[in-house]
Image: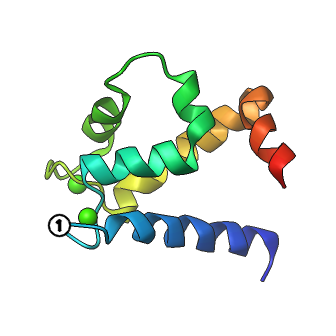
Amino acid sequence: MTELEKSMESMIVVFHRYAKEGGNKTTLSKKELKKLIENELPSFLKSQKSSDTVERIIKDLDENKDDELDFEEFLPFVAGITIACEKHFDLCQEQKGKK
Ligand SMILES: [Ca+2]
Ligand SMILES: [Ca+2]
């Protein structure tokens, strides 16, 4: 697999790892999204000052208003962070150092 294909697979695998934990197995609840962000995007969370970050994210992304995020709704969130990460290089510096 190419590097980009691996990245795409990782996004899918990570999404489903958290989505399947409870309730609807194919969507992320608020609790599951919070856990995903805490475990997989710690530097993003650090960059957010307000405590209602997760709630705000769900509100912004939840197109069909079921209070859960399916993969299609989740993807723009990852894309948004990726763009921010590319613009503010320091934000992902930490993660790059780990590899
Ligand atoms: Ca779920
Ligand atoms: Ca939804």
Residue at 31% from the left image edge and 62% from the top image edge = 70
In the displayed orientation, state which residue is furthest to the bottom. Answer: 1
- Residue 49 in the figure: left or right of residue 23: right
Disc 1 is placed on an element classified as loop
Residue at 75% from the left image edge and 44% from the top image edge = 95
The three-letter code of the residue at mark 1 reads Gly
Q: Is mark 1 within 8 Å of ligand 1?
A: yes
Is 73 or 20 nearer to us in this picture?
20
Q: Is residue 76 visible?
A: yes
Q: Is residue 37 above or below residue 55?
A: below
Residue at 52% from the left image edge and 31% from the top image edge = 45
Q: Is residue 77 visible?
A: no
In the displayed orientation, state which residue is furthest to the left. Answer: 66
- Identify the residue position indicated by label 1 in the image: 23
| Quadrant of the frame with the C terminus | bottom right
| Quadrant of the frame with the N terminus | bottom right
Dot 1 crowding, Cα within 10 Å, few <14, some 14–19, many 20+ = few
Residue 9 occupies which quadrant of the picture? bottom right
Q: Which x, y percent locates residue 67?
A: 17, 48
Residue 47 occupies which quadrant of the picture? top right
- Residue 32 in the figure: left or right of residue 87: left
Q: Quadrant of ligand 1?
A: bottom left
